[in-house]
Amino acid sequence: MTEFADRFWTSRDGLKLHYRDYAGRADRPPLLCLHGLTRNARDAEPLANRLAGEWRVLCPEMRGRGDSAYAKDSATYNPVQYVEDLLQLFAQAEIDRAVFVGTSLGGLMAMILALSAPERIAGVLLNDVGPELDPAGLERIRGYVGQGRNFPTWMHAARALEESQKIAFPDYEISDWLTMAKRVMVIGSNGRIHFDYDMKIAEPFAQPGGEAGVDLWPCFEALRGRPALLLRGELSDVLSAQTHQAMARRLDGSEAVTVPRVGHAPTLDEPEARAAIDRLLARIG
């Protein structure tokens, strides 16, 4: 595993938030890897291990995940607040702009930030997310977020992940599920293995239809003029093929790539994803 430094920044409401900082060239904007709803900085390990050195890679953990503090008010577990927290990271770490690598929720954050501070974005990868989300996929996610399950062994944890996520990764072997389990879970003080996030992040997300009525197309179109990679898992139930195609049509200069045999969301370590990321970064630096 590539070495990294554990660093922290502070939100406006006083939370101590954590990020991994993988060293890289100072003459390029850093890669800012933004994880999905229930994920953490470990989610970006394959990408960081491959690109660190040539690129500085920052992997922030949003409030309520990993080594970042949990919020007292669960209502602050929302994308607008996460973007505000990111802007504090930019200010405190003295970062002017970055290449945004946004998976699922992280991609929503990148789009929201593009509307208010497009100058921060040197390039963007939207990983299996767009301005329209499939209700079926959202309902599936609501079905498991915040359940607070825990497990006696890593094998039990891996099997539980397989049960809930096999639709997205039908070709995974048990070794793959074990790797995923160790990225999304930790051993608690009682020796049980549990998910590495505040279960209360599910509360704002649990309102069916809560995303309705919010038009994110203006946020997406604010990415115009920047190198963009639009990645979709072939089996995704969150980003439809139709929306993916519409995104490519509406964002001149973007590249739309479908990763075969995976759903929501590609790990960014698939051969097709790696090649597409390399093409994106070649356009930036």
Image (cartoon, rainbow, N blue to C red):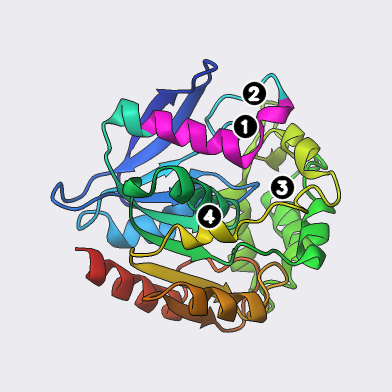
The residue drawn where x is 51% and y is 72% is 231
Q: Amino acid at mark 4?
A: Cys
Which of the numbered marks, if any, corresponds to residue 219? 4
Q: Which residues are magenta?
A: 74-89
Asked if residue 125 lies left or right of residue 54, the reply is: right
Q: Position of residue 55 (x, y in %)?
A: 24, 55
Q: Is 283 rendered above or below residue 147?
A: below
Q: Work out whether residue 90 or residue 197 is closer to the camera in this orientation and state it.
A: 90
Q: Amino acid at mark 2?
A: Ala
Q: Gap in Å between the C-alphas at discs 1 and 3? A: 24 Å
Q: Is 11 rendered above or below residue 177?
A: above
Which of the numbered marks, if any, corresponds to residue 64? 1
Which of the numbered marks, if any, corresponds to residue 153? 3
Name which of mark 3 and mark 2 comes first in the sequence: 2
Q: Gap in Å between the C-alphas at discs 2 and 1? A: 6 Å
Q: Work out whether residue 202 or residue 207 is closer to the camera in this orientation and state it.
A: 207
The residue drawn where x is 75% and y is 32% is 200
Asked if residue 84 lies left or right of residue 132, the reply is: left
Name which of mark 2 and mark 4 comes first in the sequence: 2
Would residue 179 be visible to someone looking at this image?
A: no
Q: Is 224 rendered above or below residue 252?
A: above
Q: Residue furthest bottom?
A: 260
Q: Gap in Å between the C-alphas at discs 3 and 2? A: 29 Å
Q: Residue furthest top?
A: 14
Classify mark 2: helix, strand or loop: loop
Number of other residues with Cα within 10 Å of mark 4, as a class: few under 14, some 14 to 19, many 20 or more: many
Q: Amino acid at mark 1?
A: Gly
Number of other residues with Cα within 10 Å of mark 2, as a class: few under 14, some 14 to 19, many 20 or more: some
Name which of mark 1 and mark 3 comes first in the sequence: 1
Classify mark 1: helix, strand or loop: loop
Asked if residue 97 lies left or right of residue 38, the reply is: left
What secondary structure predominates along the stretch shown in magenta? Answer: helix
